[in-house]
Image (spheres, grey):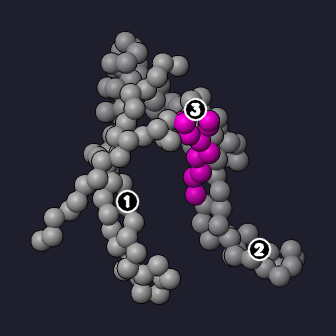
Amino acid sequence: MEDLNMGIITVTPYQNKNSKSEYYNFWYFRTCLNSTIDESDLADHIAADSKIERSRVATINNAITKQIRELLCNGHPIKIPHLGTLRLGVCSEGTATVTEFNARTCIKNVHLVLVPDKEIKQELANLSYEKYYVKDK
């Protein structure tokens, strides 16, 4: 796989205003997100990079997305080369004994997890950061 252009992530400071937190008034950074890339934009990018006709890319993207969703929802982790492994995770409440555990009442949510592979971890470690301040109103 050819090297990706190293990105620059824009971050902005924010202050923790949760008075119940032991870190109340501490300052942190959060990312400033760019515009969301939708399915059409992604097809344009892939078509330009691969020289495959855009309509074919869009059809393939739809099929891949459908299959990933179906396989994930049936408990299959999906390894995506050069990115990582997608899988489902759950958050649940604990019970004192296994017999008290009931999935319907104890599981609070299901979420998507990306376990990054070594390649993308290295790329993320080499990102540059640009500080952005929101001006006071």
What is the quadrant of residue 115 in the picture?
top right
Q: Nearer the viewer, mark 3 or mark 2?
A: 3
Q: Is residue 117 above or below residue 51?
A: below
* Tag 2 residue: 102
Left-right relation of 40 to 63: left
Q: Mark 2: few, some, or many residues within 10 Å (few <14, many ≥20)?
A: few
Precedes in sequence: disc 1 or disc 3: 1
Q: Observer-nearest residue: 74 or 88?
A: 88
- Count up the numbered dots: 3
Tag 3, which secondary structure?
helix
Precedes in sequence: disc 1 or disc 2: 1
Q: CA distance from mark 1 to mark 3?
A: 23 Å
Residue 34 lies in the magenta stretch = no
Left-right relation of 69 to 12: right
Left-right relation of 68 to 60: right
Kind of residue indicated by mark 3: Glu
The answer to whether residue 32 is visible is no
* Tag 3 residue: 119
Q: CA distance from mark 3 to mark 2?
A: 39 Å
| Disc 1 and disc 2 in contact, CB within 8 angstroms | no
State the mark number for residue 30: 1
Q: Is residue 133 above or below residue 51?
A: below
Instruction: Write the start and end of the magenta stretch as one range.
Output: 111-122
